[in-house]
Amino acid sequence: MGKTINMSAQSNFKSAWYCVGFFTILYTLSFVDRYILSLIAEPISKDLGLSDQQIGFLLGAGFAITYSIMGLPAAHLIDTTRRIPIVAAGVMLWSLSTIASAFAVDFTTLAICRAGIAAGEAVLTPAAISLIADLFPREKRATPVSVYSATAGIMGTGALVVGAATLNLASVLAPMTGIEPWRMTMILVGLPGVFLSVLLPLTVREPARVLSEGDGQRNEADLASFLAELRENWRMYLPFYLAIGAAAMYILGFLSWAPTILVRLYGYEASAAGYLLGLIGIPAALASAFFWPWISNRLAAKGREHALLATILISALILAPVFIIAPLAGSAIAVVLGVGFIKLANGSGTLAPLIIQHYGPSQMRGRLMAIYTLSASVVGLTGGASLIPFFASFWPNDPRALIYGVSLLGVIAAVLIILGYWLAGRAAVAKSGTLAKSTMVTEGRPAPSTAGR
C-alpha cells in the first residue's frame, strides 16, 4: 500500500507538489487517450469500414458532445462531495474505455467507447483546479496552476509523439500477440490510467476546502446558489467565457488545418508538417505557461488590483494582428512561426484558471472550471475546424482558400476576444467596488463618495 499523505490547506511543500505532479501526469495521459485516434484513424477506417465523415465525428463532435454534457454534473459533484474518489473513478472510466476501443467492431461500438473516454476526462480539470486552490495560498497558486495548465499546450502536439512511439511498440508486439497494431496501441495507452486510478486514492487524501474572499455571503454549494452566482455576476462571466471560446475556436481551428496548409500549398509531407509544428509548438506553449503568470505577478506587485484580467487582455491585444497576418504571410515559415507565436502569446490557457480561482467562490470553482472547459474544448473542437472550410468556400477554386478562411475567422475571433476580456475586466472592477462599499458599511465606516468619477 502506498504512502498516505495528509492533504490539508497547510500541507507541506512536498505533499502539495506531489498532488500537482500526479494530476499533471493524469492530464498528460488524458490527452494521449483523447488524440490517439487521430494517429491511427487510417488503419481503423480500413479495418472497420468507416468513412471520413464517421472518423471526423469520432474525433470532434462524438467526443465533445459527451464531454460537454458530463462536464457540469461532474463539476457539481466535485464542488459538493469528496473530489479524489470522483477523479479516480473518472480516470478508471476513460482508461477502460480506451482499452475497450481496441475491441470495437463497428462505428457504434467505437462511438460508445469515445463517449466513455469523454465522460471520464470531464472530471479531471475541474477537480484539479479546485484541489490546487485548496493546497496553495492565493499568492502561490500561479506556479502550480502553470505547471498543470502547460500540459494542454504541450500535449496538443506532444500526444502524437507519444502515440507514435506506442504505435511502434505495438507493431513490434503484433506478431507475438496476433493483435493488429492499432488495437494493441489502444490497449497500451489505456493501461497506465488503470494503474494510476488505483494509486491515486491510496497516496492522496482529500484537502480541506479553503473559503475564498466573499464566500461568507454565500457558502452553499447547491445548484441554486451556483445559478445565483452566475446570474448576479453575468456581466463578468458571460464575456469572459465568450472570449475563452473565441480564442479556442481560432487556435484549435488553425492548428487543425495548419498541416493541411503546409501540405497543399508548400509541398510538405504530412509527417514532416506535424513534426515541424510540434517542434515549435511545444516549447512555445511551455514558455507561455510561465511567462504570462510572471507578467501578472509583476503588475500585481506594482499595485494593479485586477492584474490577472489586465494581463489576459494584453495577451489578446498582442494576438489579434497575428491571428490575421500569420496565415496570409505567403510562406511555410510564416505559417510555422505564426503557430509558434500564437502558442507563446496565448495567455488564456494559464491565466483563465487563475482568474476563476481568484474571482470564483471556493465551493463553485469546479463548476466554473467546467464552463471554462466547455467553452475552450467543446467550442474549439466543434467550431473552429468546421468554420475554416466553411469560410474557405467563399473563395471556390482558389488554392489559398483555406488561408483566407483562417484569416477571416481570425478577424471575428480577435474582436470577440478583446471585447470579451475588456467587458469582463470592467465588471470585475465594478464588483470589487461594490464589495468594498458593503464591507465599509458593515464595519460602520462611511462608503467613499463616487462624485466626480
Image: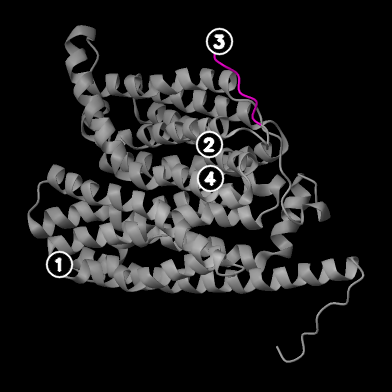
Q: Is mark 1 on a helix, strand or loop?
A: loop
The mark that comes first in sequence, 2 or 4, is: 4
Residue that mark 4 sits on: 68
Q: Which of the 4 image quadrants contains residue 31?
A: top left
| Discs 3/2, front | 3
Q: How far apart are marks 4 and 1 (CA)?
A: 36 Å
Dot 2 lies on which element? helix
The circle on residue 397 is 1
Residue 76: quadrant of the picture:
top right
Mark 3 in CB contact with mark 2 (< 8 angstroms): no
Q: Which of marks 1 and 3 is in front?
A: 3
Q: What residue type is labelled 4?
A: Ser
Distance of label 1 from label 3 (alpha carbons): 64 Å
Res 332 visible: yes
Disc 1 vs disc 2: which is toward the camera? 2
- Residue 54 position, x and y percent, is 32, 39
Q: Mark 2 points at which residue?
A: 124
- The residue nearer to you, when weighing 308 against 65, is 308
Q: Counting residues from the N terminus, which is met first, the one under dot 3 or under dot 4?
A: 3
Q: Nearer the viewer, residue 344 or 9?
A: 9
Q: Position of residue 374 (x, y in %)?
A: 52, 50
Q: How far apart are marks 3 and 4 (CA)?
A: 36 Å
> Which residue is depicted at the point 59% across and 67% down?
306
Q: At which x and y percent is residue 244?
A: 49, 60
- Could you tell me which residue is drawn at 65 percent across and 37 percent down? 78
